[in-house]
Image: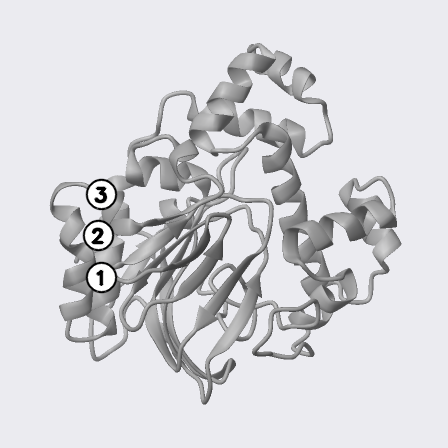
């Protein structure tokens, strides 16, 4: 596959009992393979009012000595996993569901999700911005919201065979090249009103009221809510909460010594109690447990509880390292 301009390397990761054992950076042009896959810059560069289309893309192999349950925090990204091994079991609002036959897509939600993982898991994980998912699947994200959907129900035409092609591919570079091809083909064309919606969201990040943000982009509140239903699947206030929580997680990672009261003040929470309630609602953990999980001090457990390590298909830490 020819490449033009700056490229973002992809990665593969190997985990044993939840611990990162090895990490292979898939650089764009290693001496042995000039066609090693990478993501073009336009997929990984933030827009004026929006995050990058693709937050991360990585292959993973996860081996465990015993089955494990994990509690996955809510996130502002749409998570797409192409499964290459035994299915992950997820406890959704509708009850336990198992996925295989290619993988699944997790829409936006404002509660954590419990996953049950077997002894061996492998696949490819993508963290997509909602606007990327809207472009990729060409359908309203309200069809994914607060749900987890088999990927084969969302891909169209020949792309429906991509999970099978990934499973049959001879190696990681071949698999990731298929994913890069899918993304570059499907994500080029914006959806109508996309820029207006992302501008409105940037205003909500400033703690403006929904009515103020709607007026600033020339829309009524009702019209803006309909657009958010299409482009995110959940109301504006929920999207703003998820994005603020993402900023909190990033701050916990980069500034581990900041107090919770300082974080609350900096990120626009009413007070520390408000921050604590939001963390519990969105992650199922206390703020202290969440912070410790990102410092690698949490504990993996066969039971889902507040002290369990917060890792998995929606996480960015040692077990599933940031791929970009």
Q: Which mark is residue 185?
A: 3
Marks 2 and 3: in contact by CB < 8 Å? yes
Compare residues 49 and 223 and report the one nearer the observer.
Answer: 223
Does residue 84 sit above or below 39 in this rendering?
A: below
Does residue 12 sit above or below 153 in this rendering?
A: below
Q: Which quarter of the figure has residue 268?
A: top right
Secondary structure at badge 3 equals: helix
Does residue 89 sit above or below 248 in this rendering?
A: below
Q: Which quarter of the figure has residue 13?
A: bottom left
Secondary structure at badge 1 equals: helix
Looking at the rendered structure, the number of numbered marks drawn on it comes to 3
- Residue 164 horizontal/vertical position (percent): 16, 61
The span from disc 3 to disc 2 (Cα, nearest Å) is 6 Å
Q: Of callouts 1 and 3, which one flags the residue occurring earlier in the amino acid sequence?
A: 1
The residue located at (70%, 62%) in the rendering is 285
Identify the residue at the far bottom of this view.
65
Secondary structure at badge 2 equals: helix
Find disc 1 in the rendering and name its residue: 177
The residue located at (64%, 72%) in the rendering is 308
Q: Which mark is residue 111?
A: none
Q: Report crowding for label 1: few under 14, some 14 to 19, many 20 or more residues within 10 A (C-alpha).
A: some
Q: Is residue 35 visible to the viewer in this orientation of the structure?
A: no
Marks 2 and 1: in contact by CB < 8 Å? yes
Find disc 2 in the rendering and name its residue: 181
Q: Report crowding for label 3: few under 14, some 14 to 19, many 20 or more residues within 10 A (C-alpha).
A: few
The span from disc 1 to disc 3 (Cα, nearest Å) is 12 Å
- Residue 130 horizontal/vertical position (percent): 45, 40
Marks 3 and 1: in contact by CB < 8 Å? no
- Residue 317 horizontal/vertical position (percent): 56, 69
């Amino acid at each position: 596959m020819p490449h033009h301009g700056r490229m973002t390397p992809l990665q593969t990761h190997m985990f044993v009992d939840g611990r990162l054992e090895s990490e292979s950076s898939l650089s764009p042009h290693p001496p042995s393979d000039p066609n090693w896959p990478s993501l073009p810059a336009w997929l990984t560069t933030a827009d004026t009012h929006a995050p990058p289309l693709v937050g991360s893309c990585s292959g993973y192999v996860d081996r465990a000595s015993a089955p494990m349950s994990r509690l996955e925090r809510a996130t502002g990204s749409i998570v797409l996993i192409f499964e290459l091994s035994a299915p992950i079991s997820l406890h959704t609002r509708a009850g336990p569901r198992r996925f295989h036959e290619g993988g699944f897509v997790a829409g936006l939600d404002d509660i954590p999700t419990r996953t049950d993982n077997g002894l061996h898991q492998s696949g490819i994980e993508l963290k997509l911005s909602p606007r990327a998912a809207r472009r990729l699947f060409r359908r309203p994200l309200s069809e994914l919201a607060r749900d987890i959907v088999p990927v084969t129900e969302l891909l169209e035409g020949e792309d429906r065979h991509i999970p099978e092609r990934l499973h049959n591919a001879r190696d990681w570079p071949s698999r990731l090249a298929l994913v890069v091809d899918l993304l570059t083909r499907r994500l080029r064309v914006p959806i109508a009103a996309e820029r207006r919606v992302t501008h409105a969201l940037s205003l909500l990040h400033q703690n403006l009221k929904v009515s103020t943000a709607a007026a600033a982009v020339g829309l009524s509140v009702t019209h803006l809510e309909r657009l958010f239903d299409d482009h995110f699947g959940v109301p504006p206030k929920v999207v703003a909460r998820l994005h603020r929580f993402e900023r909190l997680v990033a701050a916990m990672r980069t500034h581990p010594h900041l107090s919770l009261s300082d974080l609350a003040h900096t990120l626009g929470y009413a007070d520390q109690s408000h921050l604590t309630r939001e963390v519990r609602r969105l992650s199922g953990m206390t703020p202290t447990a969440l912070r410790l999980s990102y410092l690698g001090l949490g504990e993996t457990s066969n039971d889902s509880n507040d002290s369990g390590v917060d890792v998995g298909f929606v996480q960015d830490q040692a077990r599933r390292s940031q791929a970009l």
